[in-house]
Image (cartoon, rainbow, N blue to C red):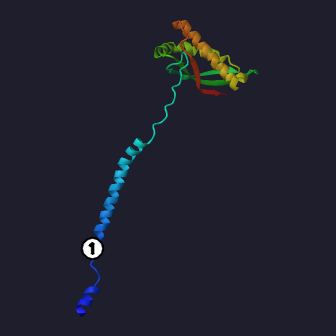
């Protein structure tokens, strides 16, 4: 009987502890992979489609814009009211509604540059250092460019002019 008592009191043998860990780890990894790849598909199916935004109504005459730079920058000397000399460096971008008009502008760049240098050289320092003065100068540049283009090709060609660089000293 002693043998039977010691046999029943003996600890049970280990049954695959490492195997269970590997099995649960593999199952967890498989669920993670499925979640990564299947999750976004399920979320797309369940989510509501985004609300459609109303299309913007285009203004008459607005269409694609084409730009060209006036390079190199224009550098001119000009004076203030006292007669002191100053320097202005201007880089401009011109906008036209078609590439064909931009090509015409590029063909006549020397005449445009000449006209702008004459215009900018007659500027007054006290006027161009203010925002209003810069805006007025920009409007005068646009008119000068349009006058040249009207003379050369019969239409103004340029719709807008922008300062992309302006240094006044």
Q: Is residue 43 above or below residue 104?
A: below
**Quarter occupied by residue 111:** top right
Please give the name of the residue rendered at 30% of the width and 71% of the height, measured from the top-left corner: 17
Which quarter of the rendering shows the C terminus?
Answer: top right
Q: Is residue 19 above or below residue 105?
A: below
Q: Is residue 82 above or below residue 36?
A: above
Question: Which is more toward the observer, 143 or 4?
Answer: 4
Residue that lies at the very extreme toward the front in this rendered image: 1
Question: Which is more toward the observer, 169 or 40?
Answer: 40
Q: Position of residue 150 (x, y in %)?
A: 55, 8
| Whether residue 128 can be seen here | no
Q: Does residue 140 appear to the left or right of 104 in the view shown?
A: right
Q: Is residue 44 above or below residue 28?
A: above
Question: Which is more toward the observer, 167 or 52?
Answer: 52
Please give the name of the residue rendered at 44% of the width and 42% of the height, measured from the top-left corner: 47
Query: Mark 1 highlights which residue?
Result: 15
Q: Tag count in the figure? A: 1
Residue that lies at the very extreme toward the bottom in this rendered image: 2
Q: Does residue 26 appear to the left or right of 53 in the view shown?
A: left
* Other residues around mark 1 within 10 Å, as few (<14) / some (14–19) / many (≥20): few
Please give the name of the residue rendered at 58% of the width and 12% of the height, measured from the top-left corner: 146
| Whether residue 81 can be seen here | yes
Please give the name of the residue rendered at 51% of the width and 30% of the height, measured from the top-left corner: 53
Q: Does residue 20 appear to the left or right of 140 in the view shown?
A: left
Tag 1 secondary structure = loop
Q: Position of residue 140 (x, y in %)?
A: 64, 16
Which quarter of the rendering shows the N terminus?
Answer: bottom left
Q: Position of residue 88 (x, y in %)?
A: 64, 24
């Amino acid at each position: 009987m002693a043998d039977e008592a010691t046999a029943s009191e003996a600890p049970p043998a280990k049954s695959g502890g490492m195997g269970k860990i590997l099995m649960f780890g593999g199952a967890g990894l498989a669920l993670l992979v499925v979640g990564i790849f299947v999750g976004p598909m399920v979320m797309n199916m369940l989510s509501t489609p985004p609300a459609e935004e109303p299309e913007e109504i285009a203004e008459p005459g607005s269409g694609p814009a084409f730009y060209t730079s006036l390079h190199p920058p224009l550098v001119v000397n000009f004076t203030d009211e006292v007669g002191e000399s100053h320097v202005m460096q201007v880089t401009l971008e011109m906008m036209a509604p078609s590439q064909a008009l931009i090509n015409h502008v590029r063909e006549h760049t020397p005449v445009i540059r000449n006209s702008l240098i004459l215009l900018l050289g007659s500027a007054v320092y006290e006027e161009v250092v203010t925002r209003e003065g810069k805006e007025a100068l920009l409007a005068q540049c646009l008119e000068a460019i349009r006058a040249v283009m009207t003379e050369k090709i019969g239409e103004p060609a340029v719709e807008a002019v922008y300062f992309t660089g302006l240094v006044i000293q």
